[in-house]
Amino acid sequence: GAGMSVSSGIPDFRSAGSGLYDTLRPELLTATEEERALIEDDPTLALDKGMFLRNPLPMLETKRDFILGTYEKRWKATLAHRFVELLHSRLGKLTRLYTQNIDGLELQTTLPKDKVICVHGTMGAAACERCGHEADFDYFCNEVRSNIKDISGQDADAPARSSPIVCDACKAPTVKP
């Protein structure tokens, strides 16, 4: 669960006062007034699949720092990740690792990919939500950096306005991690 990665410094989603949902400012999102009002009432909608298919920009803006931080490996696998790695490499006791985390920190270990089941997906890959076409992850992250505004105000080089990331296969603006 999330507790496995917290010590790496990754911001969590649900902590009161500091979690993504509690600190999200919908007025900064590229969304209609109606979408912003919905997100204000329920911040989880910024990451909702239905909202993403209608307007992908709030999700990409909300996750921009997380996407790029994961890509740049700002956060490192924790002792808990290393313990699971030892269960496999030294003891041969690991059958599978099922993780709800999307941070991809287990990918920094020597665990075989076929032993890791990412229940909610991972930030280490991107695909079109509409047609399923896999996107090159380096390309996707470069598109996020150059096309998605930084609502945290930390990246002076980020664009002032967001523009969608379009799928190479179906041309829908629905590519996401």
Image (cartoon, rainbow, N blue to C red):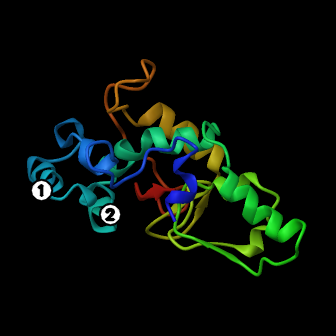
Q: Residue 54: x, y in percent?
A: 26, 61
- In-front residue for pair 2/46: 2
Label 1, secondary structure: give it: helix
Number of the front mark, 1 or 2: 1
Tell me the number on the disc at residue 53. Answer: 2
- In-front residue for pair 102/9: 9
51 vs 27: above or below: below
Task: Find disc 1 in the rendering and name its residue.
Answer: 41
Label 2, secondary structure: give it: helix
Does residue 54 appear anywhere in the picture?
Answer: yes
Q: Residue 42: x, y in percent?
A: 18, 59
Horizontal side of residue 149 vs 87, given as left or right: left
Q: Residue 127: x, y in percent?
A: 54, 61
Q: Residue at x 49, y 60 (%)?
A: 2
Q: Amino acid at mark 2?
A: Leu
- In-front residue for pair 136/29: 29
Horizontal side of residue 100 vs 125, given as left or right: left
42 vs 63: above or below: below
25 vs 126: above or below: above
Q: Residue 102: x, y in percent?
A: 53, 59
Give the class, few, some or many, for how many residues have Cα within 10 Å of label 2's Cα (few <14, many ≥20).
some
Q: Residue at x 34, y 66 (%)?
A: 49
Determine which quarter of the picture holds residue 11.
Answer: top left
Q: Amino acid at mark 1?
A: Asp
Q: Residue at x 42, y 18 (%)?
A: 156
